[in-house]
Image (spheres, rainbow, N blue to C red):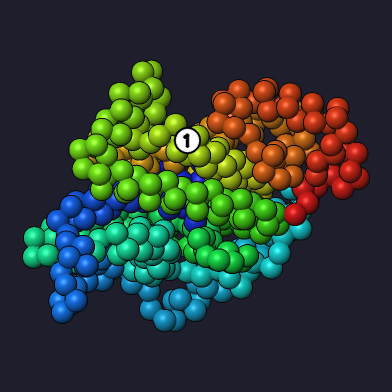
Amino acid sequence: MPLPSSSSRSSGGMLAGGDRRVIAAGLMAGAAIGVWAGGRLRTPARALGPSTTAARPAALIDWDRARQIAVNMNRGAALTAPERERLDRYYRELVRRCVPLVEDFTGTTLPPTVERTFVFDRVDWIDANLEAFKPLFAPLEEFHAERSGAATPASNVLGGVNQTIVSAELGVLLGYLARRVLGQYDLALLGREPISAGKLYYVEPNIRAVERALGLPREDFRMWLALHETTHAFEFEAHPWVRVHFNSLLMRYIEYLKQDAEHLKQGLNGLRVFAQRVRGRDAAGQQSWIEVLMSPEQRALFSQMQAMMCIIEGFSNHVMNGVGRDLLPTYDLIAERFERRQRQRSAAEQLFARLIALDVKLEQYRLGEAFIARVVAERGETFARRLWAGPESLPTMTEIRAPEQWIARMEALQELGTAAPGDPRDGSGAAAG
């Protein structure tokens, strides 16, 4: 998830590769409905007889159309070839400066990252993220093709309408984000062998626009952003289990979407499943609209993913703040102006954020950073590094909202003789991969 956090210490406008799971969730739900609707109007291929050629059903997304819409929203602000070359060198130098600072603060060695740093304009960002979205939708596309059977004239019409709607939604989403994202750590997920090395993107037209709008110092502002993104690289690459674990959660989430598509193919009986979920929603209103449509099992998985992203975002901000406060003379100025920018979001922007679940992203920043701050205040930096010991050391959402529960659990593990990375008894004082 790419809007400024409500926290004065948030980097704002960042996007990690795992965040696509949240911002794509609504689109994927809509696509699942399309699988059902199209399937209701299709005739099984076997019913057409051996001499009839079955028409291929329309794909769920027209990727070219989605790109066209997104690009049309972001005309102008293109980078020239000389600018790209110069800015690639500039941002790689920033990352090169950040690496030892993050290593010193975290006590962990970072794998090589510098040469995987690139400057983007908005269209570059759109193209990179369209390619990254395709694997997210591939399982639904496959399910759609397998279950749809042969196309009839009516199903072709409905399938085309559904494709147009979902493609337009994706295009508008990417077009909107392309104007706001400042930096991104991009990690390929859902592959058979998840890529171990991510890439760092800096969207220079957006960085320039925010710099001008908020009156920020050029060098300090870009260093501030680079600290956040370099920390993301540390989280995923210095601890390989993070990538593997998140990928496994994402794969399970896709399987649940397939199950939902199966429910929807049952017509009214399938819709009753979702109606029952809505009736069983959290009466206190603590769930997002996406969670309301989930089964208890889906919600539990979603909570795991949310907790993981809270820690990823919160820890990045913690490192950025811890290093930046001493490094950057204008740190307080940058933080204060970003906080003010967040408070001044229009009602339309706030509504859009809720509709596409970006408000969930904002909560990740706030809760994750507050959790890290509390743990460090209570037990210190070394104790907080236990977060990176393995999946069992990740807090639940309940523990994130009540950090003392996570502290107690980690101390109980210590009493049982389990020395996690970062435990003084292991002699390293650093989170190991």
Residue that extends furthest to the top in the rendered view of this protein: 284
Question: Can residue 260 be spotted in the picture?
Answer: yes
Q: Horizontally, is 9 left or right of 148 in the view?
A: right
Residue at x 84%, y 44% (from the top left corner): 429
Residue 177: x %, y % from top left? 34, 54
Residue type beneath disc 1? Glu
Residue at x 25%, y 48% (from the top left corner): 265
Number of dots carrying numbers:
1
Nearer to the camera, 1 or 242: 242
Residue 263: x %, y % from top left? 31, 43
The residue that disc 1 covers is 297
Nearer to the camera, 118 or 333: 118
Residue 345: x %, y % from top left? 31, 38
Q: Quadrant of the C terminus?
A: bottom right
How packed mark 1 is, by other alpha carbons closer than 10 Å (few <14, some 14-19, many 20 or more), is few
Residue 224: x %, y % from top left? 56, 51
Q: Quadrant of residue 153?
A: bottom left
